[in-house]
Amino acid sequence: MARSPSAIKQVLLDWCKAMTREYENVEVTNFSSCWNTGMAFCALIHHFYPDAFDYSQLDPKNRRYNFDLAFDTAEKLADIAPLLDTDDMVKMKNPDWKCVFTYVQSIYRHLRDHENNKAKVPAEAES
Protein backbone atom coordinates (compact mmCIF):
# COMPACT_ATOMS: atom_id res chain seq x y z
CA MET A 1 0.00 0.00 0.00
CA ALA A 2 1.49 3.32 -1.06
CA ARG A 3 1.50 6.15 1.41
CA SER A 4 0.96 9.81 0.71
CA PRO A 5 3.92 12.19 1.06
CA SER A 6 2.37 13.64 4.23
CA ALA A 7 2.05 10.15 5.74
CA ILE A 8 5.69 9.37 4.93
CA LYS A 9 6.72 12.67 6.50
CA GLN A 10 4.75 11.83 9.65
CA VAL A 11 6.22 8.32 9.90
CA LEU A 12 9.75 9.71 9.67
CA LEU A 13 8.93 12.46 12.18
CA ASP A 14 7.61 9.82 14.60
CA TRP A 15 10.84 7.83 14.16
CA CYS A 16 12.89 10.93 14.97
CA LYS A 17 10.79 11.55 18.08
CA ALA A 18 11.29 7.96 19.22
CA MET A 19 15.06 8.09 18.66
CA THR A 20 15.53 11.42 20.48
CA ARG A 21 12.88 11.43 23.22
CA GLU A 22 15.39 10.75 26.02
CA TYR A 23 17.62 13.70 25.10
CA GLU A 24 17.69 17.10 26.80
CA ASN A 25 17.19 20.22 24.69
CA VAL A 26 15.45 18.23 21.94
CA GLU A 27 11.76 18.13 21.12
CA VAL A 28 11.14 17.08 17.55
CA THR A 29 7.77 18.31 16.28
CA ASN A 30 8.73 19.38 12.75
CA PHE A 31 11.55 19.29 10.20
CA SER A 32 12.50 22.96 10.52
CA SER A 33 12.76 24.98 13.75
CA CYS A 34 13.30 21.90 15.94
CA TRP A 35 16.58 21.26 14.13
CA ASN A 36 17.97 24.83 14.21
CA THR A 37 20.43 24.37 17.10
CA GLY A 38 21.94 21.14 15.84
CA MET A 39 20.94 19.37 19.06
CA ALA A 40 18.34 17.15 17.36
CA PHE A 41 20.93 16.02 14.79
CA CYS A 42 23.41 15.32 17.59
CA ALA A 43 20.79 13.39 19.59
CA LEU A 44 19.80 11.33 16.56
CA ILE A 45 23.40 10.39 15.76
CA HIS A 46 24.27 9.89 19.45
CA HIS A 47 21.38 7.43 19.81
CA PHE A 48 23.15 5.12 17.36
CA TYR A 49 26.74 5.96 18.35
CA PRO A 50 26.66 6.77 22.09
CA ASP A 51 30.43 6.46 22.47
CA ALA A 52 31.21 8.91 19.65
CA PHE A 53 30.83 12.03 21.83
CA ASP A 54 29.51 13.21 25.19
CA TYR A 55 26.05 14.55 24.46
CA SER A 56 25.69 16.00 27.97
CA GLN A 57 28.49 18.47 27.21
CA LEU A 58 26.71 20.02 24.22
CA ASP A 59 25.22 23.51 24.37
CA PRO A 60 22.27 24.56 22.16
CA LYS A 61 23.89 28.01 21.85
CA ASN A 62 26.95 26.52 20.14
CA ARG A 63 25.11 25.82 16.91
CA ARG A 64 28.11 25.66 14.57
CA TYR A 65 29.88 23.12 16.78
CA ASN A 66 26.72 21.01 17.07
CA PHE A 67 26.12 20.90 13.32
CA ASP A 68 29.77 20.12 12.59
CA LEU A 69 29.80 17.37 15.21
CA ALA A 70 26.59 15.72 13.99
CA PHE A 71 27.42 15.93 10.29
CA ASP A 72 31.05 14.83 10.71
CA THR A 73 30.15 11.94 13.05
CA ALA A 74 27.39 10.74 10.70
CA GLU A 75 29.79 10.80 7.77
CA LYS A 76 32.69 9.10 9.58
CA LEU A 77 30.77 6.40 11.45
CA ALA A 78 27.77 5.71 9.21
CA ASP A 79 28.99 6.87 5.79
CA ILE A 80 26.12 9.36 5.58
CA ALA A 81 26.88 12.09 3.05
CA PRO A 82 26.75 15.60 4.55
CA LEU A 83 23.76 16.84 2.55
CA LEU A 84 23.47 19.94 4.73
CA ASP A 85 26.07 22.68 5.04
CA THR A 86 26.96 24.01 8.49
CA ASP A 87 27.33 27.59 7.24
CA ASP A 88 23.86 27.48 5.67
CA MET A 89 22.33 25.97 8.81
CA VAL A 90 23.90 28.62 11.06
CA LYS A 91 22.64 31.46 8.83
CA MET A 92 19.02 30.30 8.98
CA LYS A 93 16.77 30.74 11.98
CA ASN A 94 14.47 28.05 10.63
CA PRO A 95 16.08 25.59 8.23
CA ASP A 96 14.26 24.60 5.04
CA TRP A 97 12.16 21.62 6.11
CA LYS A 98 12.69 19.86 2.77
CA CYS A 99 16.46 19.95 3.21
CA VAL A 100 16.26 18.69 6.79
CA PHE A 101 13.73 16.01 5.81
CA THR A 102 16.00 14.79 2.99
CA TYR A 103 19.01 14.54 5.29
CA VAL A 104 17.05 12.82 8.06
CA GLN A 105 15.67 10.37 5.49
CA SER A 106 19.26 9.61 4.49
CA ILE A 107 20.14 9.01 8.15
CA TYR A 108 17.17 6.66 8.46
CA ARG A 109 18.14 4.72 5.32
CA HIS A 110 21.69 4.23 6.60
CA LEU A 111 20.74 3.35 10.17
CA ARG A 112 17.41 1.53 9.88
CA ASP A 113 19.07 -1.84 10.45
CA HIS A 114 21.36 -0.61 13.23
CA GLU A 115 21.01 -2.51 16.50
CA ASN A 116 20.01 0.70 18.31
CA ASN A 117 17.04 1.28 16.00
CA LYS A 118 14.38 0.23 18.49
CA ALA A 119 11.51 1.98 16.72
CA LYS A 120 11.27 0.38 13.32
CA VAL A 121 9.72 2.45 10.54
CA PRO A 122 7.80 0.89 7.67
CA ALA A 123 9.51 0.78 4.28
CA GLU A 124 7.12 3.48 3.04
CA ALA A 125 9.32 6.07 4.80
CA GLU A 126 11.95 5.47 2.15
CA SER A 127 9.93 6.86 -0.75
Image (tube, rainbow, N blue to C red):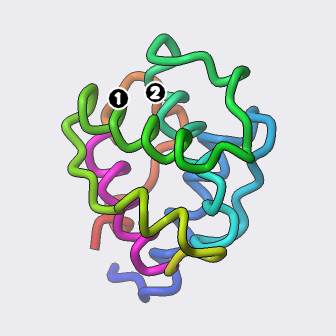
Left or right relative to 45: residue 85? left
| Magenta stretch encompasses residue 105 | yes
The crowding category of the residue bearing disc 1, from other C-alpha atoms within 10 Å (few below 14, some 14 to 19, many at least 20), is: few
Tell me where residue 74 appears, x and y as whole percent: 34, 37
State the residue at coordinates (74%, 47%). 61
* Residue range highlighted in magenta: 97-111
The crowding category of the residue bearing disc 2, from other C-alpha atoms within 10 Å (few below 14, some 14 to 19, many at least 20), is: some
Compared with residue 65, is residue 31 higher up or lower down, i.e. above or below? below
Q: Are marks 1 and 2 in contact (CB under 8 Å)?
A: yes
State the residue at coordinates (53%, 48%). 64
State the residue at coordinates (28%, 51%). 109
On residue 114, which mark appears? 1
Q: Quadrant of residue 34?
A: bottom right
Spatial CA distance of label 1 from label 2 is 7 Å
Instruction: State the residue in front, 105 or 41.
Output: 41
Left or right relative to 49: residue 27? right
Compared with residue 85, is residue 22 higher up or lower down, i.e. above or below? above
Tell me where residue 17 appears, x and y as whole percent: 66, 51
Instruction: State the residue in front, 61 or 39.
Output: 61
On residue 126, which mark appears? none
Q: Which residue is mark 2?
A: 48
The quadrant of the picture occupied by the C terminus is bottom left
Q: Which amino acid does the dot numbered 1 rest on?
A: His
Q: Which amino acid does the dot numbered 2 rest on?
A: Phe
